[in-house]
Amino acid sequence: MPKYLILAEKPSAAKNFAKALGGTSGHFSDFDYRIMNLRGHLMTFREPDEMVPETLAKKYKSWKLADMPWRLNDLNWQRTYIRTRTKGATNKQLLDQIKSELKQGYDGIIIATDTDPSGEGDLLAFEAIDAMKWQGPVFRANFMDETPQSIQQAMRQLVPIADKWQYGPYLKGESRSRWDFASMQLTRIATTLVKGAGYAVVAREGRLKSVIIWKIYEQWQKINAYVPIPFYEVKFKDPAGHVFARKVDPKIEGLPWRHAQKSAGEADLANYHESPVTNEQHVTKRQAPPKLIDLAGLAALLAPQELSAKQVLSTYQKLYEAQYVSYPRTEDRNVTPEQFNELLPVVDQIADLVQVNRQLLSHRQPRKTHVKPQGSHGANRPGTKVPASLDQLDKYGPGAQQIYTTLAKNYLAMLAEDYVYDHVTAELLDYPDFKTAFNVPIALNYKAIFNVETDDTESQSATLGPKAQPDLAEGKNPKPQTPTTKWIMAYLEKHNVGTGATRVSTLSDMSQGTKGMLKEARGKLTPTQTGNISAIMVENTWIASPKITKRLFEMMDEVEQFKMPMPQLLDSVTQVIAHDMPQMEANVANLNQRLGPPPKKRKVKAKPKAEQVTGMFKGQEIHFAKTWGNHTFTDAEIADLLAGKTITFETTTKQKKPFTAKGQLGKRTFRGNEYVGFKLIKG
């Protein structure tokens, strides 16, 4: 009977697998198993200069424009362990533990990391497998989510992987990883140029970051350049407040009946008189529930509630690990029939929890628009595990209740009837070009559960006329919309740039820390100084083009489907850099004009160099500082130190607290350079 080691992505996933299979080790289906876990990515690419022959190291360490673009064939793409600051085993120690377990005798490794649409889960698993130098069989367990049923089904349908280079998801993940690594050249180019212009920032550029920061910067430029231009035109209004106006084609400028001066508008108003309302039409229409939301849509809806993209991402992940919500990083906007039927028995329980009237959930048959046979993880939605109360979710992070409630109501809306309304149109008898149109709700149905879109044409009164009076209306050219999380997510979705999850994670990354590119406040997105610099540097570049970025995502899909070899995809990095580098050289001249002169560098007084002592130590001539902290070594102490003896003296800490220092000369390291100096002895 075979024995397999199941490799989960993280400790929480390992717990869910153990729960589903009956323990951290045991027997399932037709094999014995042991579950162990990674911690996400344990490996990362080495520095570029460490992945090329020694003769090329200087070139690949350089940030000079003359040394780019790179020849990617020079790189051996070797990885090293990611250094972690977390408590417990280092990444190397963790992999050594798994490797040691494998020596106990296993017939194969089962990759049980997340089944990501980007191939990320497959990539991080093979990084670990390669680091452990495992040569045995490898299998893939593809699971929808971490529920027991999904895990058990995946374990019964293991997919053998004979060669990772013939396995599409790994190829996609690896090609994306290499592309992103090679694109660091753009950050080096932009940063070198802006520092040369006097701006001491790191201008981070990337295939999604640059698209986002440029679009937001461009929108703020439009807002700052906006000048309201009033106009006056004649409209009619009936006693119920319905407005009758002429149809406006936004492509046509200089409409003869729109007047720049109020006096001209008033003169035009004198040409009109009261008119009867005619040609009143009523048409009953229906509107189906909206699509199921993805992670980007969720973040956009919650941003006005002061939930940042980072908080949504982090809290959602914890809710998923607790099995209260579905898999986060899905590309699906529908569910499969099986997923629909799986959730159906608990929808009443979910409705009670989020205070939705059960009677509204009368459409319990699958909608073709929302339930489709194709799909993998299914759209973001509540899980089959329902919390006893919303308060129970608070421990999973900020916004847990809002995340669950929004997901639940969006999903439950699919089970409600269509919104039904009366679409009313009419015109004026004496002036047929003046028309009105509005909607009067007949039955809210799904809108009583989930309604985030406002309808400006909606009216509570269906009563028209019988007459309408002429009125001089004042308007102005529309002000550009303020960049918000919802706005940028809609832009990226429209241009098919990235998945919902990658949009949220990228926006989260761009908004973090003192060196972040964006400030996010109640969904409003404002570039920082660093963000403004990064945006100016990518104006008219390919890396900031949504068309180019969309094409890159398509090419990665083609690599996965074996329609394009990885080297061809990676060659596009060189093409982008060849195009963008001269453009960035031109763009850097705009920094001073748009942002003002760079801040003057503060002059920092250099510390006086400590007096050095020269002497023989262990047969070699050395130099070391005569002072340590605020203590100056005496001649006797220097003699003892050179003799290899331990000395003791009274001194104070940086906080001026007295303590007894005990130490001797020994090897020290500063910025990678070794030297001999005084070392404290603990204890």
Image (cartoon, rainbow, N blue to C red):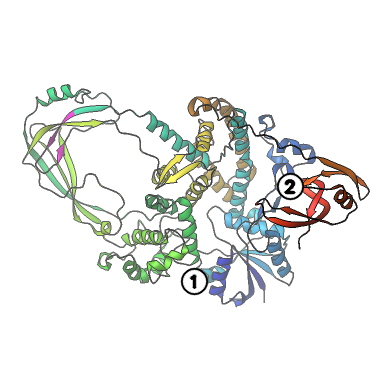
For the residue labelled by badge 2, is the local secondary structure a helix, a strand or a loop?
loop
C-alpha distance separating marks 2 and 1: 66 Å
Question: Quick one: label 2, few (<14), some, or many (20+) residues within 10 Å?
Answer: few
- The residue that mark 2 highlights is 630
- Asked whether the viewer can see residue 389, the reply is yes
Question: Quick one: label 1, few (<14), some, or many (20+) residues within 10 Å?
Answer: few
Q: Quadrant of the C terminus?
A: bottom right
Name of the residue lying farthest toward the right: 619
- The residue that mark 1 highlights is 149
The residue depicted at 43 percent of the width and 70 percent of the height is 385
Frontmost of labels 2 and 1 is 2
Query: In the picture, residue 364 is in which quadrant?
Result: bottom left
Residues in magenta, as a range: 233-245
Q: Which amino acid, mark 1?
A: Gln
The residue depicted at 65 percent of the width and 42 percent of the height is 567
Q: Is residue 666 above or below residue 336?
A: above
Q: Which amino acid, mark 2?
A: Asn
Image position of 667 (left or right of 215): right
Q: Is residue 637 above or below residue 387?
A: above
Q: Answer whether residue 475 is magenta in the image.
A: no
Q: Is residue 339 above or below residue 643?
A: below
Q: Answer whether residue 238 is magenta in the image.
A: yes
